[in-house]
Image: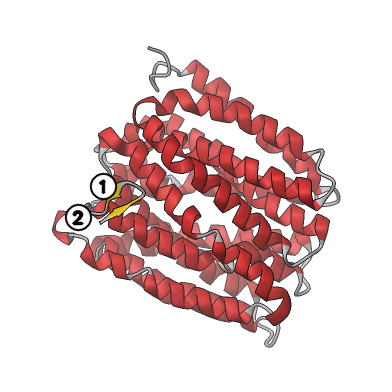
Amino acid sequence: MKLFGIKIERDVHRIQIARALHSVALSFVGIYVPAFLLTHGFSLTDTILFFVVFHVTGLIAGLTICQWSMRRIGLIQTIRFSFPLQIFYFILLNLLSVFNIPWVLIAGIGGMATFIYWMPVNILLVKHADKDNLGSDLGFFFALPKIFGIVGPLLSALLIPLFGFWPMFAVSGFGLLLSLLPLYGINKDNIRFEFKFLQAWRELSKRKLLFFLEILDNIIEESEWFWGIFVFLSIKSLSVPGIVGSLEALGGALFAVVVGKIANKHASKLVPIASVMLVVAWAMRFLVTDPVVAYATSFVASFLMTFFLVSYFGMIYKKIKGDREESFLILREIPTVIGRLIVFGAILLVVADPKWLFILPIITIAILLIVLFVYRKRFKMVA
């Protein structure tokens, strides 16, 4: 079997397909969760605090429950364990307007489900990816969800204003169950998970630079997440998040596989190029005044964001593959959450005029470029 010119014969392809189905399922409602909260009495400050609790609780669960589960019952079983939590999270969200359910509880369960899913999936991906073709494997990993995730947000944009949120929550829950199927074909005999927290923590000093880069990367990524909220607040239409989500999926899908093939050998050299282009995209967003320009900007920015992410992760994963990657991929969630909390804090500071948040990713990208230039030989950015 071939998909976009790639044979579906390796375990990494099963992981990519499972992740694609999972992302498509979440695409029906994932981009709508902030809009759901904002239309159910949450202020922008309340919504950001919801996601603060979401990520902090998820990190705690990832460093405790998740790593224990991966060691005791395995990576695949841990991924399966995240699905009932995710569906329960959707149910509680949908009941939020009916019952007085503490939002802290809902955010905590959502964070647990997310981190318990992503930690083992990232480890599986790196373990099964081919180091010489890591860019292609990552490009396929990013492209599949975007290619098949174009329709989900668009359908939500059409149906949610008419029927409300609950049908999309139901569709997402069913899609999550389907995404389990490809994981059954993975050869579990070759999967070994070893992680000792204290030993891994001691190794942290060896990878301080990589962890600092993870903070910068997540500031950039989470700023992009806020763009969808900003456009929704500006245009004030329930169709907006879905349209933005579909355009971002389309823009990213068109680029991911192409960049992945180039990144096989030149990932570290592509990161600065992608970074500079992202700075221009963020600067242009200050000029957005109407829906058409907002949608066009979303399409172009997703194109560039995919360029950046595939190149960046290709560079980072090549550095850690085969060198106790489990330790890095678990402990990286700490700088990941730190980066996201920096964005959340910045949003709270500029809540009166959220457009000023756009300065944060521009400054962050500038810092990233300086760090990569100073350490260019370590990342083989020059011949």
Q: Residue furthest left?
A: 189
Query: 10 Å neighbourhood of mark 2: few (<14), some, or many (≥20)?
Result: some
Please give left or right for residue 379 compared with residue 249 in the image: left
Quadrant containing the C terminus in the rendered view: top left
Q: Which residue shows up at 56% across the image and 81% down it?
A: 91
Give the spatial CA distance, label 1 vs label 2. Answer: 8 Å
Q: Please name the amino acid that badge 2 sits on.
A: Ile
Query: Residue 108 appears in which quarter of the rendering?
Result: bottom right
Secondary element type, mark 1: helix
Towards the viewer: 32 or 328: 32
Q: Are marks 1 and 2 in contact (CB under 8 Å)?
A: yes
Query: Label 1: few (<14), some or many (≥20) within 10 Å?
Result: some
Residue 234: which numbered mark, if any?
A: none
Label 1 or label 2, whichever comes before in sequence order: 1
Image quadrant occupied by the N terminus: bottom left
Q: Is residue 34 left or right of residue 260?
A: right
Q: x, y percentage for residue 113?
A: 46, 67
Give the percent coordinates (x, y) of residue 56.
55, 58
Identity of the residue drawn at 48% across and 72% down: 86
Is residue 85 visible in the rendered structure shown here? no
Residue furthest out toward the top: 383
Q: Residue at x 32, y 36 (%)?
A: 320
Left or right of 92 on screen, residue 119? left
Tag on residue 127? 1
SS for dot 2: loop
Q: Which residue is mark 2?
A: 191
Task: Please provide percent x and percent y for residue 60.
Answer: 47, 59
